[in-house]
Image (cartoon, helix red, strand yellow):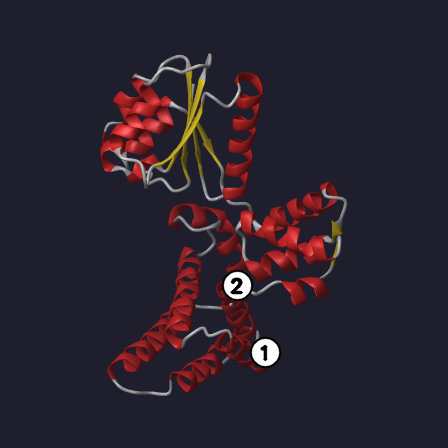
């Protein structure tokens, strides 16, 4: 049997792979277990692993991580799958797949294809509360949501952050989150944009200064602002279309799109175009002549709140 594990939810992929591996070793021992990384192994190694018969074991489990990175393997995928022996269980782990590629279409049609999409922020918060309970700790739904907004929506990162917080105190609170976790720059830029559009200019400028104190340089801030404006522009131009539809068609995280929806409701197409052009002007000027980028960006933040 051949299984494909894919999707943005790295924690779910890791959990499924761990179960497959643990169950196999419990039933057949570890002599038949083999794991290769597609970025390191060459084509002959990948092909040999998938086609060779088990040695000193009844069955064989082969786990290939990102074998599609090997162009020769990706191009030969249909023939490779056809020649996998009945005594081999093959697991292909591909976190990112190009859905336009033949490689994706073959995996989708010829393997047990398990997609692991990213969870939205509220689902992640619920998952965090359950994960804390399972480890004999607790975190409220509100504080769990704050943790998601602070460090981002990567489930594996959140799992690690929760473990760290619970080592300090099994009762996780907003205070311990602020004390022991570091705000992700992308998350903080969204908070900056949100504060600016809400007219909380002082808070927006405070967040800007926090970014600079974290050694985030003006070009990086410009890039993150541009990304936020890109998401907002998609939502503004989408009109009444649901956020999940926009996320799917634009190939964006539903979490990213949903949290930007409220801001987008305040904007018109003319306004978003103007904001994009003004940010572009700052970027161009900063590359053509020496300017005070900090002052230019702080002035731009004031413009966002107008």
Apparent side of residue 161 relative to residue 299 in the rendered image (left or right): right
Instruction: Please report the residue visible at 39 percent of the width from the left and 46 percent of the height from the top.
Output: 249
Check the image and report above or below for 268 versus 199.
above
Instruction: Please report the residue visible at 53 percent of the width from the left and 17 percent of the height from the top.
Output: 28
Residue density around tag 2, few if under 14, some if 14–19, many if 20 or more, within 10 Å = some
Q: Is residue 155 visible?
A: yes
Apparent side of residue 149 relative to residue 226 in the rendered image (left or right): right
Q: Which one is in front, 46 or 236?
A: 46
| Spot occupied by residue 180 in the image (x, y as percentages of width and height) | 65, 64
Circle number at residue 184: 2
Position of the N terminus, as image quadrant, is top left
Quarter assignment of residue 168 = bottom right
Circle 1 residue: 203
| Spot occupied by residue 174 in the image (x, y as percentages of width and height) | 71, 63
Callouts 1 and 2 close, C-beta under 8 Å: no
Q: Which one is in front, 233 or 23?
A: 23
Q: Secondary structure at mark 2?
A: loop
Q: Secondary structure at mark 1?
A: helix
| Spot occupied by residue 15 in the image (x, y as percentages of width and height) | 56, 36
Sequence order check, earlier mark of 1 and 2: 2
**Label 1 vs label 2: CA separation?**
17 Å
Q: Which one is in front, 294 or 182?
A: 182
């Amino acid at each position: 049997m051949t299984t494909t594990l894919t999707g943005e939810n790295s924690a779910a992929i890791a959990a499924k792979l761990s179960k497959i591996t643990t169950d196999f070793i419990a039933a057949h021992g570890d002599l038949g277990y083999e794991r290769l990384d597609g970025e390191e192994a060459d084509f002959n190694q990948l092909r040999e692993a998938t086609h060779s018969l088990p040695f000193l074991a009844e069955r064989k489990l082969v786990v290939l991580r990102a074998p599609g990175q090997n162009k020769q393997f990706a191009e030969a995928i249909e023939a490779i799958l056809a020649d996998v022996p009945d005594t081999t269980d093959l697991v292909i782990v591909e976190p990112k797949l190009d859905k336009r590629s033949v490689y994706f279409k073959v995996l989708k049609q010829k393997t047990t294809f398990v997609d692991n999409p990213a969870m939205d922020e509220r689902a992640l918060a619920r998952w965090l509360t359950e994960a804390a309970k399972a480890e004999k700790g607790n975190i409220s739904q509100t504080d769990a949501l704050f943790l998601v907004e602070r460090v981002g929506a990567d489930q594996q990162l959140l799992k690690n952050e929760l473990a760290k917080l619970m080592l300090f105190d099994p009762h996780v609170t907003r205070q311990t989150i602020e004390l022991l976790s570091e705000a992700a720059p992308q998350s903080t830029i969204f908070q900056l944009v949100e504060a600016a559009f809400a007219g909380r200019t002082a808070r927006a400028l405070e967040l800007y200064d926090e970014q600079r104190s974290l050694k985030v340089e003006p070009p990086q801030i410009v890039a993150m602002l541009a990304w936020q404006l890109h998401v907002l522009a998609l939502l503004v131009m989408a009109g009444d279309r649901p956020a999940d539809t926009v996320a799917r068609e634009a190939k964006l995280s539903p979490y990213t799109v949903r949290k930007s929806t409220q801001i987008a409701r305040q904007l018109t197409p003319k306004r978003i175009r103007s904001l994009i052009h003004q940010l572009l002007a700052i970027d161009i000027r900063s590359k053509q002549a020496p300017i005070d980028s900090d002052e230019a960006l702080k002035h731009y933040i004031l413009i966002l709140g107008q």
